Amino acid sequence: MHWVLEYGHSTDLNADLSNGYLADGSGRGFVLVYDQVDQPGASLTISMSTSGGGISTMTRALTQTSPGLSLYEFYDFDTDFTAGADLTNIDRITFAFNTTVSGTDISLKLLQVGSIPEPQTAGLL
């Protein structure tokens, strides 16, 4: 099974994701909060594309959670994604969820671009 969330089209999003959110410029990325992930073997692939053909991607297995227990996942632009897209002008962002069984027991509650504020970073480690 495969389902996709997509923001923008080939030439209209024009998002600048290059600015750092922490004092040292690190920690730029997507924060996703899941209400539930009940799909063994599920994964997420995020792709960021530019109109000039540049693309940066990352794929990560999703941690299983129980209903009512939120899961916070941080996807860092500098360490989790492949090089390729100029982050100063992202035109399309695609979130592709892949599962090995039918049904969709993945509940995404929040998506934001930013960083994980302290002390949550230490808690994730």
Image: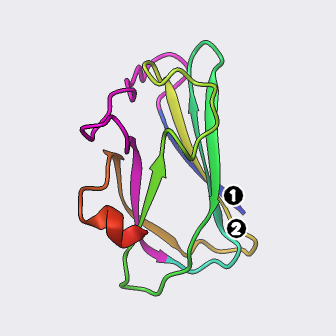
Kind of residue sitting beneath label 2: Thr
Please rate how many residues cluster around mark 1, counting C-alpha atoms within 10 Å: few if below 14, some from 14 to 19, many from 20: some
Residue 24 part of the magenta-drawn span: yes
Indicate whether 88 appears above or below 118: above
In the picture, measured across the screen, residue 30 lies left or right of residue 92, that is: left
Q: Where is residue 118 in the image (x, y as percent from the top left)?
A: 23, 60
Tags 2 and 1 in contact by the CB under 8 Å rule? yes
Query: Residue at coordinates 42% horizontally, 19% vertically from top-left?
Result: 88
Q: Which residue is drawn at 37% across and 40% down?
A: 26
Task: Name which quarter of the figure residue 60 lies in.
Answer: bottom right
Q: Name the residue under label 2.
A: 99
Q: In which quarter of the image is the C terminus?
A: bottom left
**Is 118 situated left or right of 97 in this image?**
left
Q: In the image, residue 124 lies at what x, y percent?
A: 40, 69
Q: How many labels does the image show?
A: 2
Report how far apart the C-alphas of labels 2 and 1 lie in the structure.
6 Å
Q: Residue at x 47, y 25 (%)?
A: 87
Q: How is the image coloured?
A: rainbow
The amino acid pointed to by label 1 is His
Look at 37% across and 83% down and name the residue there.
69
N-terminal of the pair, mark 2 or mark 1, is: 1
Tag 2 secondary structure: loop
Q: 72 and 66: which one is in front?
A: 72
Reply above or below: 78 against 16. below
Q: Mark 1 points at which residue?
A: 2
Q: Where is residue 18 in the image (x, y as percent from the top left)?
A: 39, 26
Task: Tell me the element at label 1.
Answer: strand
Q: Main secondary structure of the magenta part?
A: loop
Q: Quadrant of the N terminus?
A: bottom right
